[in-house]
Image (cartoon, coloured by chain):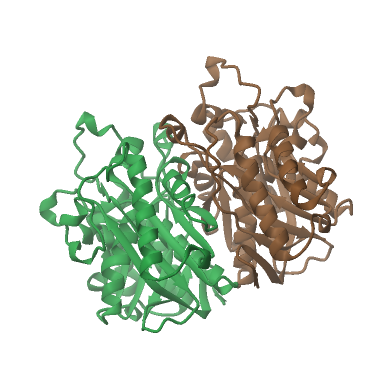
Chain colours: A green, B brown
Amino acid sequence: MKKGRQTYILDKKIYISHTATIAGVDEGKGRLRDFFDYVIDESEFGCKSHEKAEIKLRKHAIESLLKSASVSAADVDVILGGDLLNQLVPSGFSAREFDIPFCGLYSACATFGQALATGAILLSGGAERVICCTSSHFATAERQYRYPLELGTQPPPTAQWTVTGAGCAMLTTSKPKFKCPKITGFTLGKVIDMGLDDPNNMGAAMAPAAYDTISAHLRERGVGADYYDLIVTGDLGKLGRELLCTMLEQECGAVKDRVNDCGCMIFKDRQKCGLGGSGAGCSSLVFCSYLYKTMMEGGLKRILFVPTGAMLSKDSSLQGESIPAIAHAVAIEI
Amino acid sequence: MKKGRQTYILDKKIYISHTATIAGVDEGKGRLRDFFDYVIDESEFGCKSHEKAEIKLRKHAIESLLKSASVSAADVDVILGGDLLNQLVPSGFSAREFDIPFCGLYSACATFGQALATGAILLSGGAERVICCTSSHFATAERQYRYPLELGTQPPPTAQWTVTGAGCAMLTTSKPKFKCPKITGFTLGKVIDMGLDDPNNMGAAMAPAAYDTISAHLRERGVGADYYDLIVTGDLGKLGRELLCTMLEQECGAVKDRVNDCGCMIFKDRQKCGLGGSGAGCSSLVFCSYLYKTMMEGGLKRILFVPTGAMLSKDSSLQGESIPAIAHAVAIEI
C-alpha cells in the first residue's frame, strides 16, 4: 500500500529470516567483532587481486546464508546486489556462481536500503524468497576512487574508511518457526545535491539526503521520531551524524539519543579510521550482524534503517561536479 | 502473480502510456530516424564533456516525457534509471534535476529490461506512475571501456557501436484515454558465463544469456515462440542474433522471422557501425521509438522485449576474467 509520495507500507508480512556476514581484518578488530559470522585473516582473502577478493567475499556470504537458512539456490527467486565498483563487477561476477536470477542495484553506499525495499516489493508481488547482498573492500575502493595504496597518501581529517566486508539477508514471505524482524515499509529517497564538492567529506554531502528521506518517512507514515527505538543511517560518519541531528532536531526535538550511524558503530576510535566507516558493505555488515542480532534478542523492537550514498565518480569530481547524495529508509520491526 | 521460477505474470494492468527519445547524430542518420522525437546535431550537445552531454541527454528525455504526458514531477513516484558509466553518473546526476525519488539499476545493456520489470512490480505494489530511463553515449563508452577517441583505434570486425541516446517510458496504473501497450509479465535473467573473454565480441558472450531467459520465459509462461509477433533482444548484433536463432531453433523450430535485435535495427549497413548498435541506450531508444509507435499503430500486438547485457568492466578484462552476461525479458501486449 502506498502512503504518501515516497513511502510504501506493506500489507504482506516480509520476514528477514536469516542474515550472513563476512568482515575484513580491521572490521574484525572493531567494536562489532563478536557479531560477525566470519572474519578474514588477510585482506586479499587468498586471491590474486583486491577485486577478486571482493567477489569471493560476496560468494562466501551468499553461500553461508543459503547454508544457515537450509535453502537451496533453486528456492531463491532473485539476488538483489550491489557494490561500489565500476560496472558492479563484484555483484555480477559473484552472481554467476549461483543458479539464481540477478538484479544489479546502485545507490552507492545506500544500495542495501534499495535492495531491501526492492526485495520487499518483489515479495509483495509474488516472489517467495529473495537475497539482498552488498559489499565493499577498502583496497578496491581506494584504488578506484582515490589513489593506489602503494602511494601511501595521507587521508584528510574528514575522510572515512571504506569497510571491507559483505552482508546479506534472506527475505521471505514464509513465516519462519522463530520470531524474526519484518520489513513493514520503506521510503525511496530523492537525489539531493547541496553543492558540496569535497570527495573527502562525504558525510556532509550525504547528511541532507538522509534528513530529506527520514523527514519524508516520518511525515508520510504519520509517526514521530520516537516511534522508532533507533534511527540508524548508513555511513554518515561522526560529522555527518552531527549535521543530521542538527537538522532533525529543528523538526523533531531532541533525537540524538535515538539516532546513530553504522559508520560510527563499526570501528573503535583508536583504530584511526577517520570519521568512521563507509562503503556499500558498511550498512549491510552492521545491519546483518549487530542490528539484526540485537533485534532477535529483544534489544531493539523498531528501527528505521537508512543507508546513505554519495553518487560521485572519480570522473565527476575531476570534471568539477558537486556530490549528489541519496538515502533510502526501511522500517524494520519485530 | 508468480509463475515458475523466474517469471511474473501481472494481475494489475500496467500501461506504458508515453515514451520519449533523444538520439545521437549517427542514430539520426540510421534506419529509425523518423521514429525519434529529437535528434541532436553534434555529439557533445553543447556541453564541455561527453559525460555532461550524456547527463543532458537524459534530462532532455525525461523533461520531454513529463511534457508529453502532461504530468508534473510531483505526480511521479520514482525514476528507475541506469547507464553504462562508472557509478551511474549520468543517471544519478540527471535525477538530481527532478524532485522525484530515484533508484539506480545496473544490468549493463540489459538495464532497460530490469527497469521495466522493477517499474511493473512497484506499480503492482501501489505506486501510480514510474519513469524508466536508460542511456548511453558512444564517446563516454569508448573512453571508459576501450581507448580515447583521439587515438583513432580501429575496431575489430566483431565489435559493435555504442548507441548515443536516451529512451524513457512512463508506466502507470491509471488507464489512459487511448489504447496503449501494457506490460503483462516479465522474466528475470540469471548471470550466464560461457567462458568467452573477447570484449570486442559481446554478441557471442550475451547470446547464451538471451537464450536462457527467453527459454525460461516461454517454458514458465507455457507459450510457444509463436505467441509473440516479435522476440526482440537488446544488442546482440548480427553475430549474436545468429547464435541466438541457432539455439532457439533447436527448441522452438524456425524462429528467424520472428526474432530480431535492436542493435541490428538501428543503423544502416552503409554506416559501418560494426555488427550493430549496443549500449544501455540501444534497447530503450529502439523500444521507445520504433517498437512502441509500431505497437500503437497496430503493426505489432505482442512482443517479448529482451534487453541483453555484458557485465564486464575494463578491470575485469585486464585481470583475465571472462564475460558474464544477463538478459531480462518483458512481455508487452496491446
Which residue is outermost to the front?
B250
**Residue visible at 35% across and 58% down?**
A61
Q: Quadrant of residue A149?
A: top left
Q: Quadrant of residue B216?
A: bottom right
Find residue B324 and report its horizontal and vertical position in percent.
53, 43
Front-most of A73 and A287?
Answer: A73
Does residue B29 show up? yes
Front-most of B116 and A49?
Answer: A49
**Residue visible at 21% across and 45% down?**
A42
* Position of the C terminus of chain B by quadrant: bottom right
**Residue visible at 32% across and 81% down?**
A301
Front-most of B75 and B298?
Answer: B298
Left or right: B244, with A21 as reference point: right
Which residue is outermost to the right?
B298
**Residue visible at 57% across and 77% down?**
A1
Left or right: B79, with A259 as reference point: right
* Position of the N terminus of chain B by quadrant: bottom right
Left or right: B46, with A28 as reference point: right
Find residue A52 and report its horizontal and vertical position in percent.
36, 41
Find residue A19 and report its horizontal and vertical position in percent.
35, 67
Whether B81 is drawn above or below A313: the answer is: below
Which residue is outermost to the left?
A270
Find residue B323 and report its horizontal and vertical position in percent.
52, 38
Does residue B66 show up? no
Task: Count every numbered label the image shows and give the total.
Answer: 0
